Image (cartoon, helix red, strand yellow):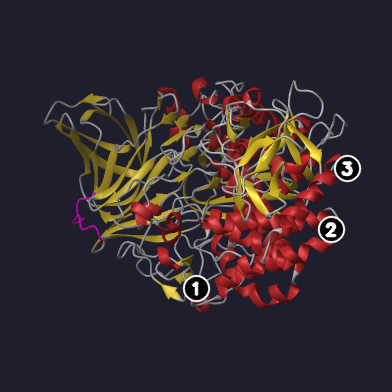
Amino acid sequence: MRSFLLGFLSVATAAGSSGLHTLNKRASLGPIATDNPSGITGGEISCAAPPVNSFFEGTKPPFPTNGWWAPYAAPPGNATAAGPFPYQSALDGDGYVFGLSTNREFDGASVKQPTQKDWRVCFTEHSGEFSNHKATAWDTQTVTLQYFESDASMTVYGVPGSPYITFQFNESTPLLTTMNGGIQSFNSKSLPDGGNVTATGTEFTMTDTSNSTYIIYSLSSITLTANSVSESAGTISASSEFTGVLRLVKLEDPGHKAILDKHYEIYPVSVEQDYDLSSTTGTLSFTWNTVGSGSDLLMLTWPHHRLAMQNGNFPDTTALAYLTTKGYMYPALGNGWKMLYNLTSMIWDPPRKLDPSCSPTVLKGLEYEIGKLDPADAPIPGDFYYWGGSMNAIARLAVIADNVGRTDLISPVIDYLEASFDQWFNTSATTTAAYETAWGGVINKAGANNSWVDFGNGYYNDHHFHYGYFLAVAAVIAKYDQSWLNEHKDFINWFARDIVNPSVNDPYFPIARCRDWFAGHSWASGIANGAGSRDQESSGEAINGYYGALLWASVALSDDMVNYAKLLLATEMQGTQVYWHLYPDQASTDPNNPYPEQGLRDLVTMGNVEDWQSGAWLFWGSQKSQIAAIQMLPVQPVNEILYDAEWVKNVWDYTMVELLDPSIGDEWKSVIVDAYSNVNPQVAAQWSANMTTWGSGQTYTNELYFIGTRPNPAGTPICGSDTLPSNPYGEFLIQDTSSGNYVAVSSANTNLIASATSTSDAATFNSSFVPNSGTLQLISTNEFVTADQSGNYTLSATRDTVSAWETFVIREKIGGAAGVYSIQAVSNKQYVTVGGDGSLVNNGANEAAGSEFKFIPA
């Protein structure tokens, strides 16, 4: 099911380090570039939501924007953060708030674990001033926080994967406040309302009135007093100033205490991340810096870790387990993890040639779609997202033309792309890119003070979606125009640096902005709305973000960056297949099943994965085909890894009712058909032949090219003669077989009427190719026949240009005599009927209701 993933784990034996950590150093991967982006067309601008005042005191941008702890820094700075998992947390003026949700719900569409606040931890000397906390260090996964008041302080090590939350106090008096009920017992002693219990030692157990149990471990002896303030509140406070470490851990099961007791003295403060890359494999390494022996470090793994790790020191899953929205986190020992991934050999082309049976139709599609491109009409960008998606679809035509040997068709595509792309270099353009100085990154300038512009691009939402398309288009141009690459390389690199910068030595961009390295995938959420919940809907476009970076790296950057982009691509695909793809046959007891609920797995595909809920739904659509297709698009050769057979078959069956529904457009269906071709290309080709629209992010040519380059174990032609029927093309007279009359056009109103009783009075039409359909052009006037979308009016020859309203599917009618055709209007999917007065109207609900026509060569 996910067999492309391999991995291993090795235990590092180096002694741990203590003290504050610094930003991660990775000598193996230097920066893409280090030049100042201030010369970008839109200049410099500051986002209207800069970091919370004083949070990054003493440091300067670039700052992380999309990671799990973004809510700590994004104003107002007190939203709930997506970690450090298994916990969630928030910062307020009175201290560090955290908890672990025990209320898991399945509502038929989503699993939810609503945020639960169990504790607020601070010290009695703290004034409660919100500004009296800050980040003192961070790396690719962790953040170190400090609450301070004069010489007193509390340092919090936010390390995802640690079962304990670690607090280091300095000349301060610890104060722990319950937030999910009063204190029921302390060290097994009951507390009546208003009562208290005092104990001295290094281990304390507290149960609150909601029956949550936490253990407090101290690395040195301390005296704590538990006070039962009320049924809903309680405090635990130290007897005096304390310099030392406290660790809090949720005890979900009494049987877990043994392993927690054994490992609490070893704690992580930061992580170093590195890569061992070749063209075929990539090793992602996590090495936690620890206080105490790193080999005894207790950490927690998610399913995607366990699938990629080898030789792991894994205690039994019964020893410790926490159920999260990504499934159970189970223990692993050791401060060094190594996860090995197979890297794709595909960059531009699929690993096999186009099936010969598909070549004629693909070539015809190329000629048609490229023939429509006019640089004078190239679009002026109005945003990053829609512009990027549509231009990426066009750019694919050049790559396909190159692959099939039609190099003469490459230049028209490149000319068109360059004409549109030139607008990004125009300082007077309406839509420009700017360097945002408060956080450090490239944004749509118009969105710097409006989170609704370009899906929140100015607030760092969706950058890997947007710039993946941007980089893919730029890479195609650069592949075929070296002078363009030489002139614009620095400009394009700013966008690559924004989403795939590998190095802390780039002074202007954070490392891999959207990637959550511990979570195993990216987050689309930036800093909008206080950074709020982390979420990602379009896993397909996240993957494309790193595919676009791979294409750019292959033409403009180093081999190391090519392999780094491949690693990003492989890990994003793994995260998608584990957390977005649902497998109904996967056992609920499978330790690597993130969703034990059978009802959820039966929904086949996630639509949105968030930190506190995940479900088969979207913010913007509810159709099954939409939910599935957004995890598949855009269709690129490398996606044959993503479209694993089990998932694709399940999606095919699950969405079939919508695939058969003529009221649902082909834009989403076309993507699902392409994915299904990874399983059965012949069937996919048959379905593809009945599509007439592909959306702005897909083309007819790419649709059929992907199908025609699939594995073909059957060995039969993918695009058989009966698979891809086409309209009759040429000049014809059209005869209504029921009346025997020929179609004529009234000079008064240009309506099509089956009224001519002889061929001499009949109108002549030129039937021309349009992918999977065609146009009818009246020879006498050169006007195209158009169909009303409502199906209430007679067809008429009145249009100078062609759109969907002027497109028809003309096929031999099922059940009809040889040479008898039905005509379907693409505009409303209705069939043409002949009325009592001979008028041709597109109002037949199905083919059987449509009239029969003969096309007689003129």
Does the residue at mark 2 contact the one at mark 1 (Cβ under 8 Å)? no
Residue 830's place in the image compared with 121, above or below, is: above
The tag earlier along the polypeptide, 2 or 3, is 3
The tag earlier along the polypeptide, 2 or 1, is 2
Would you name the residue on which mark 2 appears?
406
Q: Residues within 10 Å of mark 1 (few under 14, many from 20)?
A: some
Question: Relative to residue 319, is residue 360 drawn left or right?
Answer: right
Does the residue at mark 2 contact the one at mark 3 (Cβ under 8 Å)? no
Amino acid type for the residue under numbered disc 3: Pro
Please provide percent x and percent y for residue 389. Answer: 59, 54
In percent of the image, x 56 and y 47: which residue is there? 749
Which secondary structure dominates the residues rendered in magenta? Answer: loop
The image quarter containing residue 551 is: bottom right
Q: The residue tagged with tag 1: helix, strand or loop? A: loop
The tag earlier along the polypeptide, 3 or 1, is 3
Would you name the residue on which mark 3 appears?
356
Q: The residue tagged with tag 2: helix, strand or loop? A: loop
- As measured in the structure, the alpha-carbon distance from the residue carrying label 2 to the one carrying label 1 is 35 Å
Does the residue at mark 3 contact the one at mark 1 (Cβ under 8 Å)? no
- As measured in the structure, the alpha-carbon distance from the residue carrying label 2 to the one carrying label 3 is 15 Å
In percent of the image, x 72 and y 38: which residue is there? 4
Question: Relative to residue 782, is residue 452 drawn left or right?
Answer: left
Amino acid type for the residue under numbered disc 2: Arg
Which of the image's four quarters has the C terminus? top right
Residue 45 shown in magenta = no
The dot on residue 257 is none
